Structures are given as structure tokens and as C-alpha cells.
Image (spheres, rainbow, N blue to C red):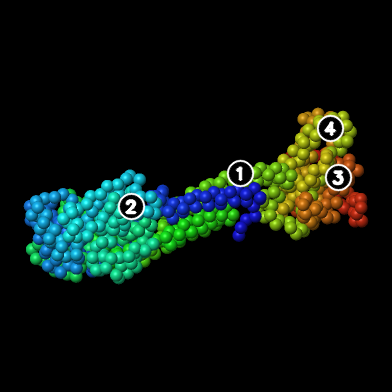
């Protein structure tokens, strides 16, 4: 349920939504353009985690690695291998039945003419691609464009005449983890294919075709990321791709290479380049290239193309804007739970879909949604604290206009007294005799101070006996006992309060108020059924009691005045006391009196003086 909000709050919410659109839109625009941002710092570890959850892939049947490993280096007496031995290795790979050969070695420096010629001749015997490498400016390629080299390392002309050339550079993230394999490079010699793209063409016997956002090979159509970059899906830890030692191949044990693309590279300890992957912190570079080639041949690369990036951007906008709107307009807990659940569902979906090969971004929606939602929650809490403080101040102010017992009841139950309630209660009226003359003597300001002291005494003595002061009437007050909830000792508490009021007000008049004569106190007390209700207009109401018994209690102060008494108590109230009645002492007289405006007379007990001990007996 959306809460009704003031116009100012809705305006603030609209500003917050617009700011969220600007923030998430900026991040989404960079994501769509392929620009690096803080999103990548979040996305990269989450991608690693999702790859680990998805688990390793089965070894490919199309690619095998011929590794110049520790055993080969030991048997050959060191590294690098002489070109004559490389030539022998190439011929052995050809003899083992490899369908094509990709050599991840930089053959850029000449050796002896005989060895170089032997290797060139061997390369011509089998479809082969050899590696070139580019050096790049620190800024790298423009977002969405294929990488442009600042300098290149080219194989010797003798080798490029015998074999195809492809650039073997790998695109890594800030932590050095390979994420993409570029399939096209801009070089000083013009656009050049990547190493993996060349190798796939040799294996298939037909060059792959690069489209706008995909590459078509002989066996599959593979979607590509921006700039013709292949999103890498690593098969698993090191040696997850079938590997044969170069020493074994030289010894004639290369049967595992039959019909496959053989990838020759270095895996010996401390030789060649290595990369950290989610599955293994040290993976030889030749295995990274082998994974990329297998991704292309088998069509199992991660899918992160323009369409996927657009889905990422849409999710970021919806989750961030929706989250801010939810925590701003719904109750905070409900809005926060719904927004968090939506984010968690998206993250869960990215985990599931990565296992299916779809690389949706987990980092972009998180980066787009969490800061604005967090700020909105903080602003909402600050706003609600301010509103709460204002409401508390307003409630404290309003409670000054309602008896505390009724204010607490209404706070707990705002529907209290929507319908009138009939119940029994003790009604006490108190007023000061001779007050008009006294107020004339005091003047307005001193009269106010005088009445404030009088009213304070009434409230304190009434509240001490669980009574409620419902109304002040100048020099008088109406209090009730047994409201809002009845109590078993209502009438005894009311009578104790009556004695306490007459005693304390009388003492105050003689001492603190400085009144020696001409003013006194009268109290009338009655018990019976009353109607407790809200009276007044819908927009301006007062809680009070009404009914015949209220009128009787009010008239009892006139009875007290007529008989020169301080306290007049009806027999209806005294009859409820039973055994407790003796504790209040005997009245000075009991009279059957006529009540003005009422047909039936009332029996009234009169006390001429109000001074009683704390137990109510005569002093």
C-alpha cells in the first residue's frame, strides 16, 4: 500500500528518482559503450564466483596442447629449444595426424640460417599459424573499438612466408585475469586477425567471417562483445585441456593429436607467460589461447553482446529507479525488503544464466541501485525522525488539552469513543465560593496565576486517585472516576479525593493564596450511569460525560452552598461503599433535598468542614 505523502515529500521523491536516473543512466551508458568503470571492480569478482559455481567444462575434443614443459626442457638441455628441434617437433606433430598447428612462440630473432630454414620448411608441411604480439599505449583502444597497436613484434619473414600470422595478445581485467580474446587488431600493416581466429580458419579449412556482433565459423555462429572481442569461458584449472609433453611427441608418442588442432606453447616452470583464472592462480598463456580456440570451434564462449549489454542497462535502470521509489513511497521496511528481493533475484538469475553461457552483469545493477537506494533510505530515516519528533511535540502539546489517561487510551486506540459508551462513574464537581469578588481585587494577571495554582491542586489530587479532570470551568472543575475504565474501588477513591481536595484547597486558600475570608471551596459528589462520548463538530471535539447523573453532581455544589457545607455526597455513592463507608467518618447531617430541574429528591450527606485525616475521618 502506497502511503499518502505531502506535496513536499512527493517533490523530494521526484528529485531523488531523477537523480537516480542520471546516476544509473551514466553507468549504463558507459557499460553500453564498453568503457571501464567502477562497475568492473564489482563485476570481476562476481564473474569469477559465478564461473566457480557453474564449474569446469568437459575437455574439448577439437584442441590439444603440445607443451614445452619441465620434462621437455630437461631432456633438451634447456630453453629455448634450438630451431632445428622445433622443426623436428613440428614434423612430429604433423606425423601424429594433427589437423592444423598453432604455435604460441614469438619467432622474432634469427638463429643460424640452417636452423631457421629447417623450421620454415617444417612449417610449410602443415597448416600453421604463428604468433605475433602487439604493444599498446596505456590508454588502450577506444571504447567499443578493436585494439590498435603502438608497436608490434613480427615473426621473421622466412616464417611468415611459410605460415599464417595472428596476434596472440589476451585482454585481461585490472587483476590480470583474462576476460576477452581480441579477434581483430589494428596494426601498422593494417587490420590483422587474432591468433585464435587464424587457428580456427586453418582447422576448418575456411576463414571465419566477422559480422557486426558475431563471428561465423564452419561449425557455429558465436556472438561477440564490443570491438570483436570474444568473451572467454575457461574450461577449468590448468591442464583441463588435453595436454601432451613435447618430449613425448618428439619420442613418437603423439597419438592424442590425431584430427585435432595442436597448440604448441610453453608450460615449463618460470618460462613463458602465465595468467590467474577463477580455477587456478597459475595458468600458462598457451592454455588461455587453447580455451579461446576451443570456445570458437565448439561455440561455447560466454555470450556478452550488445543485446546482453542492453538487458544489463535496462535491469540497472529498473532496479535502481524502482528501488528508490519503493523505499520512498511504501512503508520503509516493506519497500526495502521488496527492493532487496528484486536485486537478489537478479543476482540469482545471473548465476543461473552464466551456467548456460549468458554473461549478464551482476555488478552494473548493484552499482546503479545500491548507492541511490542507500541514500534514499538514509533520507527517509532522517525525514521520519523529524516527522516523529514533530508528532511527539504535537502529541505532548495535545496531551495538555486532554487528560493523560484519555490521551494514552486514544494513542493506543485512535477509534476510542467513535461510538458513545454508557458506564457507571463517580462525578465530582468543585468550585470556589466568593471568587468573583476576589478576581476583581486581583486583576487579570494575578487572577490567572491564582486559578493556575487552584487547577494544579485539582489535577494532582484527582490523578493521585486514578481520577480524570474532564473540564475546567473558571473557578471550578469537573472530574470523574472510573473513566475510561471502571475499577472496583472507584467510589472510595472518589470520596478520598473529595476529602483531600477540600482539605488541601482550604489550606492553600488560608496560606499560599493569602485568602483569610470571603472565599471557600465546595464539592459535590455523585455516582451513577453516564455517557462517555466525543462531543462537538467532527473537526473539533471534546471528550466528556453527560446524562442526568452529571447534572445531579453539579447541583450538589448548590446544595452544599445552601446548607453551608463544604462537601455534599449523594446516598447513591455512599451506598456503594458497604463496609468501607465507616472509614470516612460520619457526615454532619443527612438531608433529603430537592434538586433544581429534577423531579425526584436526592438524599445527600453533608460535611460542614472539609478537614479530614488521610483516611478520611474527621480531624
- Mark 2 touching mark 4, by CB under 8 A? no
| Secondary structure found at label 3 | helix
Mark in front: 4 vs 3? 4
Which residue is painted at 69% across and 52% down in the image? 410
Residue 386 is marked as 1
Q: CA distance from mark 4 to mark 1?
A: 39 Å
Q: Position of residue 563 (x, y in %)?
A: 90, 43
Q: Nearer the viewer, residue 261 or 12?
A: 261
Q: Badge 2: few (under 14), some or many (20 or more) residues near its Cα, within 10 Å?
A: many
C-alpha separation, residue under disc 3 versus residue under disc 2: 102 Å
Q: Which of marks 2 and 3 precedes in the sequence?
A: 2
Separation of disc 2 and disc 4 at Cα?
A: 92 Å
Dot 2 lies on which element? loop
Q: Viewer-nearest of labels 4 and 1? A: 1
Distance from disc 4 to disc 3, alpha carbons, whole Å, reads 26 Å
Above or below, comparing residue 562 to residue 529 in the picture = above
Q: Which residue is labeled 4 in the image?
A: 444
Residue located beneath label 2 in the image: 147
Residue shown at the point (32%, 53%) measured from the top left = 186
Report whether residue 602 is seen.
yes
Q: Nearer the viewer, mark 3 or mark 2?
A: 2
Q: Secondary structure at mark 1?
A: helix
Mark 2 vs mark 4: give the one in front.
2
State the residue at coordinates (58%, 56%).
Answer: 330
330 or 508, which is in the foreground? Answer: 330
- Check disc 4: other Cα within 10 Å, few if <14, some if 14-19, many if 20+: few
Amino acid at each position: 500500500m502506497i502511503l499518502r505523502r505531502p506535496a513536499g515529500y512527493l517533490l523530494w521523491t521526484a528529485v531523488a528518482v531523477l537523480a537516480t536516473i542520471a546516476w544509473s543512466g551514466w553507468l549504463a551508458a558507459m557499460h553500453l559503450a564498453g568503457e571501464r568503470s567502477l562497475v568492473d571492480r564489482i563485476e570481476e569478482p562476481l564473474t569469477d564466483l559465478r564461473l566457480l559455481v557453474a564449474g569446469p567444462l568437459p575437455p574439448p575434443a577439437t584442441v590439444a596442447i603440445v607443451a614445452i614443459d619441465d620434462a621437455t626442457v630437461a631432456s633438451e638441455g634447456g630453453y629455448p629449444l634450438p630451431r632445428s628441434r622445433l622443426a623436428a617437433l613440428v614434423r612430429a606433430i604433423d606425423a601424429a595426424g594433427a589437423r592444423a598447428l598453432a604455435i604460441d612462440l614469438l619467432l622474432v630473432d634469427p638463429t643460424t640460417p640452417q636452423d631457421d630454414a629447417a623450421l620454415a620448411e617444417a612449417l610449410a608441411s602443415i597448416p600453421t599459424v604463428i604468433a605475433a604480439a602487439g604493444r599498446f599505449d596505456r590508454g588502450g583502444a577506444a571504447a567499443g573499438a578493436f585494439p590498435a597497436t603502438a608497436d608490434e613484434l613480427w615473426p621473421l619473414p622466412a616464417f611468415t612466408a611459410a605460415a599464417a600470422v595472428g596476434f596472440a595478445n589476451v585482454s585481461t581485467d585490472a587483476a590480470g585475469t583474462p576476460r576477452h580474446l581480441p579477434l581483430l587488431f589494428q596494426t601498422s600493416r593494417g587490420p590483422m586477425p587474432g591468433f585464435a581466429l587464424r587457428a580456427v580458419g586453418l582447422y576448418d579449412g575456411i576463414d571465419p567471417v566477422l559480422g557486426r556482433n558475431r563471428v561465423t565459423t564452419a561449425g557455429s555462429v558465436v556472438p561477440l562483445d564490443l570491438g570483436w572481442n570474444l568473451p572467454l569461458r575457461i574450461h577449468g584449472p590448468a591442464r583441463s585441456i588435453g595436454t601432451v609433453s613435447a618430449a613425448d611427441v618428439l619420442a613418437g608418442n603423439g597419438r592424442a593429436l590425431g584430427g585435432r588442432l595442436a597448440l604448441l606453447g610453453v608450460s615449463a616452470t618460470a618460462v613463458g607467460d602465465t595468467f590467474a583464472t577463477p580455477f587456478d592462480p597459475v595458468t600458462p598463456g598457451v592454455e588461455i589461447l587453447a580455451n579461446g580456440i576451443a570456445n570458437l570451434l565448439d561455440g561455447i564462449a560466454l555470450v556478452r553482446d550488445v543485446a546482453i549489454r542492453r538487458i544489463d542497462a535496462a535491469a540497472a535502470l529498473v532496479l535502481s529507479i524502482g528501488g528508490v521509489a519503493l523505499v520512498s513511497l511504501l512503508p520503509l521496511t516493506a519497500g526495502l525488503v521488496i527492493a532487496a528481493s528484486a536485486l537478489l533475484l537478479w543476482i540469482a538469475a545471473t548465476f543461473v544464466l552464466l551456467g548456460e553461457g549468458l554473461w549478464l552483469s551482476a555488478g552494473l545493477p548493484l552499482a546503479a541501485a545500491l548507492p541511490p537506494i542507500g541514500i534514499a533510505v538514509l533520507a527517509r530515516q532522517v525525514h521520519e525522525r523529524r516527522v516523529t519528533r514533530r508528532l511527539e511535540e504535537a502529541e505532548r502539546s495535545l496531551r495538555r488539552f486532554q487528560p493523560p489517561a484519555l490521551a494514552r487510551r486514544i494513542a493506543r486506540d485512535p477509534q476510542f469513543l467513535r461510538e458513545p459508551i454508557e458506564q457507571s462513574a463517580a462525578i465530582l464537581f468543585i468550585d470556589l465560593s466568593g471568587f468573583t469578588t476576589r478576581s476583581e481585587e486581583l486583576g487579570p494577571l494575578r487572577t490567572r496565576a491564582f486559578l493556575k495554582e487552584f487547577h494544579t491542586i485539582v489535577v494532582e489530587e484527582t490523578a493521585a486517585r486514578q481520577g480524570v479532570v474532564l473540564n475546567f470551568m473558571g473557578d471550578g472543575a469537573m472530574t470523574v472516576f472510573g473513566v475510561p475504565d471502571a475499577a472496583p474501588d472507584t467510589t472510595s477513591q472518589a470520596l478520598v479525593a473529595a476529602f483531600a481536595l477540600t482539605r488541601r484547597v482550604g489550606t492553600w486558600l488560608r496560606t499560599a493564596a493569602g485568602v483569610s475570608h470571603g472565599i471557600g471551596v465546595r464539592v459535590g459528589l455523585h455516582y451513577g450511569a453516564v455517557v462517555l462520548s466525543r462531543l462537538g463538530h467532527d473537526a473539533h471535539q471534546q471528550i466528556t460525560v453527560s446524562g442526568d447523573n452529571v447534572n445531579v453532581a453539579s447541583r450538589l455544589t448548590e446544595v452544599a452552598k445552601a446548607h453551608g457545607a463544604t462537601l455534599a455526597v449523594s446516598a447513591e455513592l455512599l451506598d456503594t461503599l458497604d463496609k468501607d463507608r465507616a472509614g470516612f467518618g460520619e457526615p454532619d447531617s443527612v438531608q433529603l433535598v430537592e434538586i433544581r430541574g429534577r423531579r425526584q429528591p436526592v438524599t445527600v450527606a453533608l460535611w460542614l468542614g472539609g478537614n479530614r485525616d488521610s483516611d478520611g475521618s474527621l480531624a
